[in-house]
Protein backbone atom coordinates (compact mmCIF):
# COMPACT_ATOMS: atom_id res chain seq x y z
CA UNK A 1 0.00 0.00 0.00
CA UNK A 2 1.23 3.48 -0.86
CA UNK A 3 0.56 6.44 1.42
CA UNK A 4 0.98 10.13 0.76
CA UNK A 5 3.58 11.57 3.12
CA UNK A 6 2.71 15.25 3.36
CA UNK A 7 0.28 18.06 2.73
CA UNK A 8 -3.50 18.08 2.76
CA UNK A 9 -3.81 14.38 1.85
CA UNK A 10 -1.07 13.15 4.19
CA UNK A 11 -1.66 9.55 5.23
CA UNK A 12 -4.16 8.84 2.43
CA UNK A 13 -3.72 5.32 1.05
CA UNK A 14 -3.35 4.81 -2.68
CA UNK A 15 -3.57 1.65 -4.74
CA UNK A 16 -0.34 -0.20 -5.36
CA UNK A 17 0.61 -1.40 -8.84
CA UNK A 18 0.38 -5.17 -9.26
CA UNK A 19 2.90 -5.08 -12.11
CA UNK A 20 6.33 -5.86 -10.67
CA UNK A 21 7.95 -3.62 -13.31
CA UNK A 22 6.23 -0.57 -11.83
CA UNK A 23 8.44 0.61 -8.99
CA UNK A 24 6.92 3.51 -7.06
CA UNK A 25 9.38 6.00 -5.59
CA UNK A 26 10.26 4.94 -2.05
CA UNK A 27 8.94 6.86 0.95
CA UNK A 28 12.50 7.91 1.84
CA UNK A 29 13.20 9.30 -1.64
CA UNK A 30 9.77 10.97 -1.85
CA UNK A 31 10.13 12.72 1.49
CA UNK A 32 13.68 13.78 0.66
CA UNK A 33 12.64 15.19 -2.72
CA UNK A 34 9.80 17.25 -1.28
CA UNK A 35 11.99 18.44 1.61
CA UNK A 36 14.48 19.72 -0.98
CA UNK A 37 11.81 21.34 -3.17
CA UNK A 38 9.69 22.67 -0.27
CA UNK A 39 7.98 25.92 -1.28
CA UNK A 40 8.95 25.60 -4.96
CA UNK A 41 6.14 23.05 -5.29
CA UNK A 42 3.44 25.47 -4.08
CA UNK A 43 1.55 26.80 -7.08
CA UNK A 44 3.69 24.93 -9.62
CA UNK A 45 2.52 23.06 -12.69
CA UNK A 46 3.87 19.51 -12.35
CA UNK A 47 4.53 17.17 -15.28
CA UNK A 48 5.14 13.53 -14.44
CA UNK A 49 6.55 11.22 -17.11
CA UNK A 50 6.48 7.42 -16.71
CA UNK A 51 3.85 8.08 -14.05
CA UNK A 52 3.38 4.47 -12.86
CA UNK A 53 1.06 4.89 -9.85
CA UNK A 54 0.85 8.69 -10.04
CA UNK A 55 2.11 9.03 -6.48
CA UNK A 56 4.62 11.79 -7.21
CA UNK A 57 2.08 14.05 -8.91
CA UNK A 58 -0.45 13.41 -6.14
CA UNK A 59 2.22 14.12 -3.52
CA UNK A 60 2.98 17.42 -5.30
CA UNK A 61 -0.72 18.34 -5.40
CA UNK A 62 -1.12 17.41 -1.74
CA UNK A 63 1.72 19.81 -0.96
CA UNK A 64 0.23 22.72 -2.90
CA UNK A 65 1.01 22.28 -6.61
CA UNK A 66 -1.50 24.06 -8.86
CA UNK A 67 -2.04 21.21 -11.33
CA UNK A 68 -0.46 18.04 -12.66
CA UNK A 69 -0.20 16.37 -16.04
CA UNK A 70 0.72 12.69 -15.97
CA UNK A 71 1.99 10.67 -18.95
CA UNK A 72 2.07 6.87 -18.87
CA UNK A 73 2.02 4.26 -21.63
CA UNK A 74 0.63 1.15 -19.89
CA UNK A 75 -3.19 0.88 -19.91
CA UNK A 76 -3.27 -0.92 -16.53
CA UNK A 77 -1.14 1.82 -14.96
CA UNK A 78 -3.36 4.52 -16.49
CA UNK A 79 -6.43 2.90 -14.91
CA UNK A 80 -4.61 2.67 -11.55
CA UNK A 81 -3.55 6.32 -11.73
CA UNK A 82 -7.14 7.37 -12.48
CA UNK A 83 -8.40 5.42 -9.45
CA UNK A 84 -5.75 7.08 -7.25
CA UNK A 85 -6.69 10.52 -8.60
CA UNK A 86 -10.33 9.77 -7.81
CA UNK A 87 -9.44 8.54 -4.28
CA UNK A 88 -8.05 11.93 -3.28
CA UNK A 89 -10.55 13.98 -5.30
CA UNK A 90 -7.97 15.56 -7.61
CA UNK A 91 -9.93 15.14 -10.86
CA UNK A 92 -10.03 18.89 -11.53
CA UNK A 93 -6.29 19.33 -10.95
CA UNK A 94 -5.02 16.37 -12.99
CA UNK A 95 -4.80 15.58 -16.66
CA UNK A 96 -3.87 12.02 -17.55
CA UNK A 97 -2.48 11.13 -20.97
CA UNK A 98 -1.43 7.88 -22.58
CA UNK A 99 1.97 8.37 -24.17
CA UNK A 100 5.57 7.23 -24.34
CA UNK A 101 7.94 9.91 -23.09
CA UNK A 102 10.82 8.48 -25.11
CA UNK A 103 9.00 9.32 -28.38
CA UNK A 104 8.91 12.81 -29.83
CA UNK A 105 5.42 12.18 -31.22
CA UNK A 106 4.05 11.83 -27.67
CA UNK A 107 5.06 15.42 -26.90
CA UNK A 108 3.38 16.71 -30.08
CA UNK A 109 0.20 14.92 -29.03
CA UNK A 110 0.60 16.18 -25.45
CA UNK A 111 0.95 19.76 -26.69
CA UNK A 112 -2.24 19.55 -28.77
CA UNK A 113 -4.18 18.04 -25.89
CA UNK A 114 -2.87 20.62 -23.41
CA UNK A 115 -3.91 23.46 -25.74
CA UNK A 116 -7.40 21.98 -25.92
CA UNK A 117 -7.69 21.20 -22.19
CA UNK A 118 -6.05 24.44 -20.99
CA UNK A 119 -6.90 27.16 -23.55
CA UNK A 120 -5.39 29.77 -21.19
CA UNK A 121 -2.05 27.96 -21.51
CA UNK A 122 -0.15 25.40 -19.45
CA UNK A 123 3.63 25.11 -19.11
CA UNK A 124 5.43 22.78 -16.75
CA UNK A 125 7.35 24.41 -13.91
CA UNK A 126 8.66 21.04 -12.70
CA UNK A 127 9.11 17.77 -14.51
CA UNK A 128 9.55 14.47 -12.69
CA UNK A 129 10.49 11.28 -14.51
CA UNK A 130 11.04 7.77 -13.21
CA UNK A 131 11.50 5.57 -16.29
CA UNK A 132 12.13 1.82 -16.19
CA UNK A 133 15.69 1.11 -15.12
CA UNK A 134 18.41 -0.23 -17.40
CA UNK A 135 17.11 1.16 -20.70
CA UNK A 136 18.86 4.54 -20.95
CA UNK A 137 15.50 6.31 -20.96
CA UNK A 138 16.55 9.33 -18.88
CA UNK A 139 18.94 10.53 -21.60
CA UNK A 140 16.49 9.75 -24.40
CA UNK A 141 13.67 11.58 -22.59
CA UNK A 142 15.88 14.62 -21.95
CA UNK A 143 16.56 14.76 -25.71
CA UNK A 144 12.81 14.62 -26.39
CA UNK A 145 12.15 17.37 -23.85
CA UNK A 146 14.84 19.57 -25.43
CA UNK A 147 13.01 19.19 -28.78
CA UNK A 148 9.54 19.87 -27.36
CA UNK A 149 8.25 23.15 -28.76
CA UNK A 150 6.44 24.04 -25.52
CA UNK A 151 9.74 24.23 -23.64
CA UNK A 152 11.60 26.41 -26.13
CA UNK A 153 12.96 29.36 -24.14
CA UNK A 154 11.63 27.79 -20.92
CA UNK A 155 13.73 25.45 -18.78
CA UNK A 156 11.75 24.01 -15.88
CA UNK A 157 13.45 22.10 -13.08
CA UNK A 158 13.69 18.41 -13.94
CA UNK A 159 14.10 15.63 -11.42
CA UNK A 160 14.99 12.21 -12.79
CA UNK A 161 14.89 9.09 -10.67
CA UNK A 162 17.18 6.35 -11.97
CA UNK A 163 19.48 3.50 -11.02
CA UNK A 164 22.91 4.47 -9.59
CA UNK A 165 24.86 3.16 -12.59
CA UNK A 166 22.82 5.10 -15.17
CA UNK A 167 24.77 7.46 -17.39
CA UNK A 168 23.05 10.72 -18.18
CA UNK A 169 24.35 12.11 -21.44
CA UNK A 170 22.48 13.98 -24.16
CA UNK A 171 23.13 16.36 -27.00
CA UNK A 172 21.74 19.86 -27.31
CA UNK A 173 19.97 19.95 -23.98
CA UNK A 174 19.55 23.24 -22.10
CA UNK A 175 19.77 21.43 -18.75
CA UNK A 176 22.75 20.67 -16.57
CA UNK A 177 23.06 18.54 -13.45
CA UNK A 178 22.62 20.67 -10.33
CA UNK A 179 22.84 17.89 -7.76
CA UNK A 180 22.44 14.17 -7.28
CA UNK A 181 21.24 12.32 -4.18
CA UNK A 182 21.26 8.57 -3.64
CA UNK A 183 18.50 6.78 -1.73
CA UNK A 184 19.08 3.02 -1.59
CA UNK A 185 18.96 1.66 -5.14
CA UNK A 186 17.72 4.95 -6.60
CA UNK A 187 19.36 8.25 -7.45
CA UNK A 188 17.52 11.55 -7.79
CA UNK A 189 19.23 13.81 -10.32
CA UNK A 190 18.18 17.47 -10.31
CA UNK A 191 18.64 19.27 -13.62
CA UNK A 192 18.42 23.03 -14.00
CA UNK A 193 18.49 25.46 -16.88
CA UNK A 194 21.21 27.91 -17.88
CA UNK A 195 23.05 29.45 -14.93
Image (cartoon, rainbow, N blue to C red):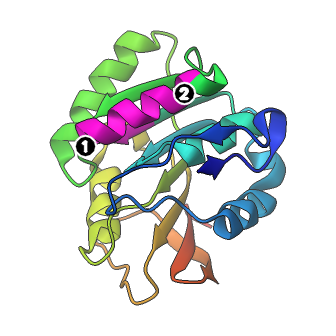
Give the position of the C terminus as an image quadrant: bottom right
Q: Please report the residue visible at 70 percent of the width from the left and 69 percent of the height from the top.
A: 28
- The residue under the point 60% across, 25% down is 87
Name the disc covering residue 42, or none: none
Whether residue 150 sits left or right of residue 161 in the image: it is left
**Residue placed under numbered mark 1 in the picture:** 74
Q: Is residue 75 magenta?
A: yes
x%, y% of residue 97?
33, 30
Q: Which mark is residue 85?
A: 2
Question: Where does the image place residue 144, in percent across and percent down from the top left?
Answer: 27, 54
Q: At x 28% / y 67%, what residue is drawn?
A: 137
Q: Residues within 10 Å of mark 2 (few under 14, many from 20)?
A: many
Task: Indicate whether residue 97 is drawn in magenta.
Answer: no
For residue 44, say whether it is visible: no
Percent across and percent down for residue 53 are: 46, 45
Q: Earlier in the sequence, mark 2 or mark 1?
A: 1
**Image height of 191 relative to 110, above or below:** below
In-front residue for pair 145/66:
66
Q: Secondary structure at mark 2?
A: helix
Residue 79 visible? The answer is yes
Q: Which residues are magenta?
A: 70-86
Q: Position of residue 50 (x, y in %)?
A: 37, 51
Q: Is residue 89 left or right of residue 142?
A: right
Amino acid sequence: MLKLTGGQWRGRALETPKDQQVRPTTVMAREALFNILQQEVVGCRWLELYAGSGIMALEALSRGAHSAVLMERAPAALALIQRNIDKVGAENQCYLLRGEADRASSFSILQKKLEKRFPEGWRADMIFMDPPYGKGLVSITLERLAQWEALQGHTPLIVAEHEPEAEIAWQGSPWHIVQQRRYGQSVLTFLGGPS
